[in-house]
Image: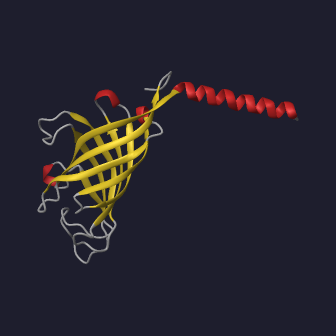
């Protein structure tokens, strides 16, 4: 019986050592980019309403109501102008109108987004952000709840502010600052 416990302990110790060899020291990474959310169909929409909340009448895409759900595949760029800025990735996920009150400052979304990096040092890696978007707050904070690739085991926070918002169309450009703690992965199969 005692030899089984020692063998189990040695196996666990070897597994921990192998994991430690692949995961380097914890590092903090700061990312900054712009998120282009286009809901107007005639402008090649990148966010599309897929479910309507309860409403007595049909509504155009730029009008929102409690319960509406949008799926997004938004462009992420280094600069504010999408046409002249380098693309760093895509924001893929969904947001839904989560507040009954539709007036500022109460209007809020629930956002669940994977930030998929397609260029640069973090190409092929993702970060996952999940949280409440109080749309009319100057700066909103979201938790970073995970990641993949270079951001495996990530945790941290994202700060987002609206740089441009068109009330007539619902289109927006959002500036993101992300601070994330993750392991520096080294070894076979790790970016």
Residue 113 coordinates in the image, percent (x, y)? 35, 49
Answer above or below: position of 120 versus 34: above
Q: How is the image coloured?
A: secondary structure
Q: Horizontally, is 64 left or right of 67 in the view? A: left
Q: In front here: 77 or 160?
A: 160
Residue 74 coordinates in the image, percent (x, y)? 25, 46
- The residue drawn where x is 11% and y is 35% is 84
Give the farthest residue toward the top: 188
Answer above or below: position of 17 versus 173: above
Query: In the rendered image, which quarter is residue 34 located in?
Result: top left
Q: In front here: 71 or 131?
A: 131
Give the farthest residue toward the bottom: 56
Residue 146 coordinates in the image, percent (x, y)? 44, 44
Q: In front here: 157 or 103?
A: 157
Answer above or below: position of 131 versus 60: above
Q: Quadrant of the C terminus?
A: top left
Give the farthest residue toward the right: 1
Query: In the rendered image, which quarter is residue 20 located in?
Result: top right
- The residue drawn where x is 39% and y is 36% is 28
Counting the numbered discs, the total is 0
Q: Quadrant of the N terminus?
A: top right
- The residue drawn where x is 29% and y is 56% is 140
Residue 80 coordinates in the image, percent (x, y)? 15, 42
- The residue drawn where x is 44% and y is 36% is 182
Answer above or below: position of 119 versus 82: above
């Amino acid at each position: 019986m005692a030899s089984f416990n020692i063998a189990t302990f040695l196996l666990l110790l070897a597994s921990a050592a192998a994991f430690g060899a692949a995961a380097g020291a914890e590092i903090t990474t700061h990312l900054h980019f712009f998120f282009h959310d286009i809901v107007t169909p005639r402008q090649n929409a990148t966010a599309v309403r897929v479910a309507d909340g309860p409403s007595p009448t049909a509504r155009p895409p730029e009008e929102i109501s409690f319960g509406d759900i949008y799926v997004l595949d938004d462009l992420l760029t280094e600069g504010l102008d999408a046409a002249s800025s380098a693309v760093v990735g895509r924001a893929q996920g969904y947001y839904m109108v989560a507040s009954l009150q539709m007036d500022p400052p109460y209007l809020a979304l629930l956002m669940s987004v994977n930030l998929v990096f397609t260029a640069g040092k973090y190409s092929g890696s993702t970060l996952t952000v999940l949280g409440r978007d109080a749309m009319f707050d100057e700066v909103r904070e979201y938790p970073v709840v995970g990641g993949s690739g270079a951001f495996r085991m990530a945790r941290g926070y994202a700060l987002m502010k609206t740089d441009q918002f068109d009330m007539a169309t619902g289109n927006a450009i959002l500036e993101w600052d992300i601070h994330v703690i993750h392991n520096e992965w080294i070894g076979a199969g790790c970016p």
